[in-house]
Amino acid sequence: MTESNHYETLELHPQASQAEIKQAYRRLAKIFHPDTNQSTADHDRIAGINAAYEVLSDPQKRRTYDVRLKYAGFEGGGDRQVRTKAAQTSHRQRRTTGQRTDAELNQWLQEVYRPVSRWLSEILNPLEDEIDQLAADPFDDELIEAFQEYLSDCRDRLELAQVSFRSYPNPINVAAAASNLYYCLNQIGDGIEELERFVYSYDEHYLHTGHELFRIARRLKREAQDAVRTLV
């Protein structure tokens, strides 16, 4: 068999449970995704991991894949009737799965992506103006109070975005977009903490760090948007 074995890609036994598959995917994604670990980032590896997870996490796709693995090992091609029936079954399953996937995608876009994207924009877009206003006099009580109100609003919107993100399971075909949104939310949470430290310490290191974390979050948001564009 010349193609990659999905079970080997995820370092799993063929009898692995769905929970074990999900756990293996998350563990490997943390290791090889470029946004989580630059030292071990591997674009080809993460692409293979995503492809393997897309198949093995879907029970119908997994059954079809297991059948294909079984017959791929037969020398001489096996029984023609069995292979033909398996191919017909696979086609029907792909058609049904495709219809279900489209419905899941539309629901995810409606319930997760659009509201999360809106909350993220309302957090990220005002930051530059807020910093510019604060720069006039970082020790001015009114300016500091206004900046604190902005950060409080950011926390409220971040919580709303996190609730929306968890409101509907991510379909397999949005794995890239969902991953970028997840890390974007994390970066914003860390960025807010750094900016709040600046408010209480007036140490510009925290202001610069928070600004940089928001810049990374903005890039992740754009990458999520690009990934969604390939799906719709």
Image (cartoon, rainbow, N blue to C red):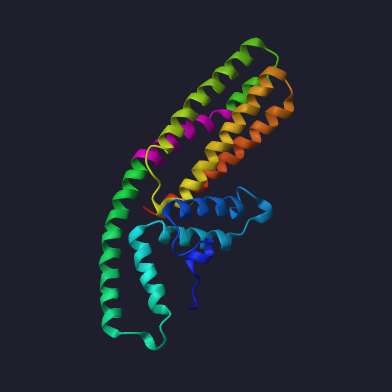
Residue drawn at x 55%, y 42% as measured from the top left = 183
Q: Is residue 127 magenta?
A: yes
Q: Does residue 125 appear in this view? A: no
The residue lying toward the viewer, choosing from 232 and 56, is 56
Residue drawn at x 42%, y 60% as measured from the top left = 56
Percent x, y for residue 66? 39, 69
- Going by the image, does 182 lie left or right of 193? left
Which corner quadrant of the image does residue 112 belong to? Answer: top left
Percent x, y for residue 95? 27, 63
Q: Is residue 75 magenta?
A: no
Q: Which residues are magenta?
A: 111-128
In the orientation shown, which residue stands out farthest toward the top?
Answer: 141
**212 relative to 6, above or below:** above
Which corner quadrant of the image does residue 40 belong to? Answer: bottom right
In the orientation shown, which residue stands out farthest toward the bottom?
Answer: 76
Percent x, y for residue 62? 38, 63
- Going by the image, does 131 lie left or right of 100? right
The residue lying toward the viewer, choosing from 109 and 64, is 64
Which corner quadrant of the image does residue 16 belong to? Answer: bottom left
Q: Does residue 207 appear in this view? A: yes
Residue drawn at x 44%, y 62% as measured from the top left = 15
Percent x, y for residue 26? 52, 50
Q: How many marks?
A: 0
The residue lying toward the viewer, choosing from 111 and 56, is 56
